[in-house]
Image (cartoon, helix red, strand yellow):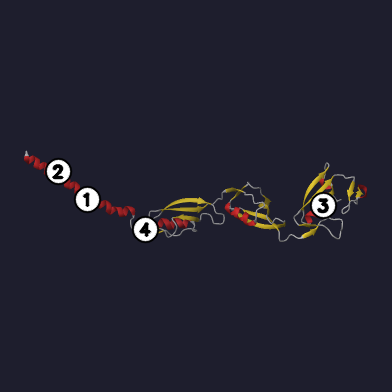
Amino acid sequence: MSIVNEKIRRSFRFNLLVVLILFFVAYILFFSSLKCLTHHGEEVKVPNVTGQPFETAEKILKDMGFELQIDSTYEPTIKALTVLKQVPDSNAVVKRSRIILLTINKTTPLMTPMPNLINLSLRGAIMILKNNKLILGDTTHRPDISGAVLAQKYNGNDIASGQLVPQGSRVSLVLGDQMNNPDIPVPSIVGIAFDQAKFILEGNGLGYSVVASGAITDSSSAIVVAQVPSSGNDPNVPAKMKEGEQMVITIQQNPDQIPSSNTNSQTPLNNKQK
């Protein structure tokens, strides 16, 4: 019986020794291969591919053993399919198997609502255009005391806020010109047809608003019966306005009498010069 027990003990010790040896060998093999599996010690600097065409950047990074993940956005001033951003940044030290995130410029712009730029300063308008990925186009000036944005145009036409336009579109602005806003004599338009009055006001760079006296059936032939401000009673000392300012004019379809331009007298309609 003791001989049997001795054999069992020897067998147990032998098997335990074998297990220990196998475990030790596996331990050595595991940590020996861990370096290969994790590429330990194979760290490299990430190259700078920002600004490169995607095709070029992809080849450079894949040749260095990197994996790629792609995102996209749109920048109107940069060529399509250009790398806009990379993560990690260039010169970061990483393992070769690291995933590099590239943000690529889209080929087709997104649509964006047109912002409201009216009454903003030029600087404020440019900032809002940039935030909406729109580009400042031509700027023209019109006499106005505000010096702010008076109109916003797309493809030569006025564009309302909220209307969708492609990102990267050029938006032209009409700006008030405070530096070139001289005093001009107020023209006398009382007693003349509305169409002729408009021509005179627009020729002098003046705006206008219209008040109707009675029913108007044909505005072009209606007569101007009053204006504010007036041209003054003394022709040698005319009233002054700034270019871009508004005159209020009152029109009447068929007045019985036509007021004289610079006096309070009334002129009979049948005496009006044709």
The disc placed on residue 24 is 1
Residue receiving disc 4: 43
Q: Give the mark nearest the N terminus, 4 or 1.
A: 1
Classed neighbour count for the residue bearing mark 3: other residues with Cα under 10 Å, few (<14), some (14–19), many (≥20): many
Residue behind mark 2: 12
- In this view, the residue in front, 22 or 238, is 238
Number of marks in picture: 4
Q: Where is residue 274 in the image (x, y as percent from the top left)?
A: 90, 51
Q: Earlier in the sequence, mark 3 or mark 2?
A: 2
Q: What residue type is labelled 3?
A: Ala
Q: Residue at 79% of width from left, 59% of height from top?
A: 184
Q: Residue at x 90, y 47 (%)?
A: 257
Q: Does residue 172 appear to the left or right of 42 in the view shown?
A: right
Amino acid identity at mark 1: Phe
The numbered mark, 4 or 2, whose residue comes first in the sequence reads 2
Question: Which residue is the site of mark 3?
Answer: 197
- Disc 2 crowd, CA 10 A, few/some/many (<14, 14-19, 20+): few
Q: Residue at point 38% right, 59% down?
A: 44
Q: Which amino acid does label 4 sit on?
A: Glu
Label 3 vs 1, first from the N-terminus: 1
SS at badge 3: helix
